[in-house]
Amino acid sequence: MSAPRGDRTRRSTSGRHAGLALLDELPDIDAADVARCARVLLRRPLLRADGPDGDLLPLVYRHRAVLVELFTTVLGYRLVVERRFARLYKTGPGQDATRGEPGLTPRAYAYFALAVACLTGAGRQILLSRLVADIRAAAVEAGIAVVDDYADRRALTAGLRHLVALGVITETEGTVGPWSNEAPTEALITVDTDLLALLVAGPLREAEDGADLVVLAARPGARGVEHTLRRRLVEDPVITHAELTDAESTWLRRNQRRESVLLDRAFGLMTETRVEGVAVTDPEEYLTDVVFPGTGTVARIALLALPELLGLREPDADGTHPVTTAEVFQTCDDLVNAYPAAWSRQATEDPHQLCREVLALLERLGLATSDGRGGWSLSPAAHRWAPTADDQPLSSGAGRALREPAEPPSAPPVWSLFDEG
């Protein structure tokens, strides 16, 4: 793929990516500040002065010109910075069902979207009862069945509370909380119309329906494969060559060393490159929305189940390990029964639900992929958590897992593991 015209001269003279060249032109302190701000914006795409990490907004505003160019060049993201807020417009996740705001169910998401639509013409203030009535009317108009029960009210409340957390609406009098009667407790809500206008990132005017909007919101950036893959490296924990197209895999193999340097300099991310693909980690765990290994029962059982599941059978040619839901259930059940006092009783009282939660966690981490028919494929990256003896030399046993591919390799070998170096 040919380089954009404005970038070709810089590459030909320095051999470096424009994002690296941009950082190289800054004093070390400023370059560190820019990387710090970029990390905050990746974690808080809507950054406001009175919100989480809001103390860094002045620094973001100071370096806004460099940050705008950095995100445009490196990821193809649009960045808007004002004194009160900064908004990073990321692309959508497409059909990836593992991404989403924790705590929001699909129905809560629907109510959140309907609330945004209703608030657009509501003015600066609105009563909660009026907003709820407008949302329900909009739901009926959109063909969404409204059942006024506890679960429905809880979903509606969650959608509204998320707007409060974003700073889009403020509880001037009263509160947006759960209610048990037919109508919510009255409250006066103030709307921040400036923030409201920044919420929607997808191209609404171009989309014909919801499905079309999902596709358009996830379209690649101006640099095609380069932006598509780099976004995945930043946003996803694991990318394997088996899931990429030939063009994407070729680009990643050709540029993997340069990309490692770029992600480290620009965002503080570390890459582990193996013949099967690339794993990206944040040493500070700031950009990690799911910490693994974790301290909860589901996370610990998932961690202990991985070595057992990986050892059930030989891997396929692409390094993935096929397992079934029944095998995952049995492995989790064996762990629960072997160490009954180690787990939360609430988490283990329903073995089938525990199995579903373990698989959901592994899927969200990119370590498991469902075929939709009860079968699962465990990623080669799952071997990063396989136990090894403390006195075992890294060059023996799993030593072949640590081989770095040639630059670029002509073809991947039949099998190698992701493993910690």
Image (cartoon, rainbow, N blue to C red):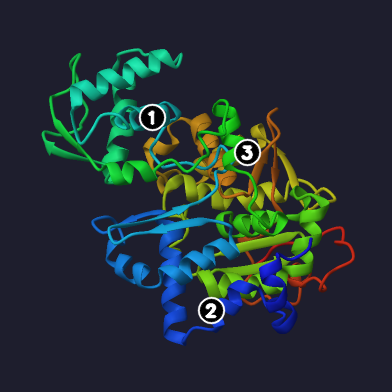
Given the image, on which type of amino acid does mark 3 rest? Val
Task: Give the residue displayed 33% in from the left and 15% down from the top.
Answer: 137
Name the outermost residue toward the left.
Answer: 173
Residue 33 versus residue 310 in the image, above or below: below
Mark 2 nearby-residue class (10 Å; few <14, some 14–19, many ≥20): many
What is the number of the mark on residue 155?
none
Tell me, yes or no, if residue 198 can be seen here: yes
Task: Give the residue displayed 68% in from the left and 75% down from the top.
Answer: 392
Q: Quadrant of the N terminus?
A: bottom right
Report the residue marked by disc 1.
108
Task: Give the residue displayed 70% in from the left and 64% down from the top.
Answer: 4
Report the residue marked by disc 3.
328
Q: Position of residue 170 (x, y in %)?
A: 20, 41
Single out the mark in the foreground, 2 or 3.
Answer: 2
Single out the mark in the foreground, 2 or 1.
Answer: 2
Q: Position of residue 232 (x, y in %)?
A: 62, 55
Could you tell whether 192 is left or right of 286 in the image? left
- The answer for how far apart the CA atoms under marks 2 and 1 are is 41 Å
Could you tell whether 152 is left or right of 225 in the image? left
Given the image, on which type of amino acid does mark 1 rest? Ala
Residue 158 versus residue 30 in the image, above or below: above
Snapshot quadrant of residue 348:
top left
Among the two numbered marks 1 and 3 on one chain, the one whose residue lies closer to the N terminus: 1
Q: Position of residue 132 (x, y in %)?
A: 26, 22
Nearer the observer, 335 or 369? 369
Q: Position of residue 52 (x, y in %)?
A: 30, 57
Instruction: Give the SS element for disc 3.
Output: helix
Residue 154 versus residue 311 in the image, above or below: above
Q: Are marks 1 and 3 in contact (CB under 8 Å)?
A: no
Mark 3 nearby-residue class (10 Å; few <14, some 14–19, many ≥20): many
Report the residue marked by disc 2.
23
Instruction: Give the SS element for disc 2.
Output: helix
